[in-house]
Image (cartoon, rainbow, N blue to C red):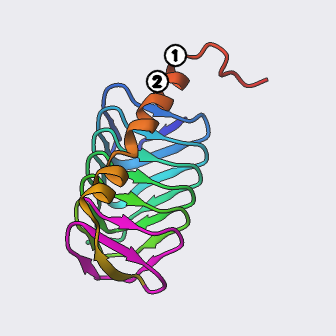
Amino acid sequence: MSIYKLGHYIPSIGEGCFFAPDSKVIGNAIIGDDVSIWFNSIVRGDVDQIQVGDRTNIQDFSMLHVSSGFPLIIGKEVTVGHRVTLHGCVVGNNCLIGMGSTIMDGAVIGANSLVAAGSLIPPGKKYPPNSFIRGVPGRRERDLTSEESTNFGSHYKSYLENKKLYLASNSFERI
């Protein structure tokens, strides 16, 4: 893991976090408690701030970046799937962002929502809580059922357990 100061910005890192050895956190980034940032992911807070809420996981090959005037704010207990790009947007608590999705500047994903794999969320688009969003461009299909919301919103828990395994493992060594 590499943490980089940029100018006068030094990333703030919470307690109990796991950072894969090849992940990078740069500049104006605030990382909450029990966050995991997995292999080859980049958190680049250079032209605005990035906030990652407690117990959130950022999976492999994801890119978190910002534009001037568009901070990136990710809520608590969010799962960000593999190869996701989050750019200057807001993701509410307990969301699941599917693999390969892109969410662009000024977009807002309401709490307890699911963005299906491969979706493209256009700049400035706003979705209410409990939304099932999919497609290119992303469209709100419907409300999530209570059961879906619970299942998708709890996905982060498996990554908390996986994070503990990696932190505790003496066998996680480069060979």
Q: Residue at x 52, y 16 (%)?
A: 168
Q: In the visual, does 121 lie left or right of 91?
A: right
Whole-percent x, y for residue 109 in the image: 28, 69
Residue type of the residue flagged with mark 1: Ala
Q: Residue at x 52, y 23 (%)?
A: 165
Whole-percent x, y for residue 175 in the image: 79, 23
Residue 159 position by quadrant = top left
Residue 5 seen anywhere in this rendered image of the structure:
yes
Q: Residue at x 29, y 51 (%)?
A: 150
Whole-percent x, y for residue 52 in the image: 32, 48
135 lies above or below 101:
below
Q: Residue at x 40, y 30 (%)?
A: 17
Which of the two residues, 95 or 123, is positioned nearer the viewer here?
95
Magenta segment includes 74: no
Residue 130 position by quadrant = bottom left
Q: Which residue is mark 2?
A: 164
Disc 2 to disc 1: CB gap under 8 Å:
yes
Q: Badge 2 local density, few (<14 within 10 Å), some, or many (20+)?
A: some
Q: Badge 1 local density, few (<14 within 10 Å), some, or many (20+)?
A: few
- Magenta residues (range): 112-137
SS under mark 1 = helix
Report how far apart the C-alphas of labels 2 and 1 lie in the structure.
6 Å
Residue type of the residue flagged with mark 2: Lys
69 lies above or below 1:
below
Q: In the visual, does 99 lie left or right of 109?
A: right
Q: Which residue is mark 1?
A: 168
Q: Residue 108 has which mark?
A: none
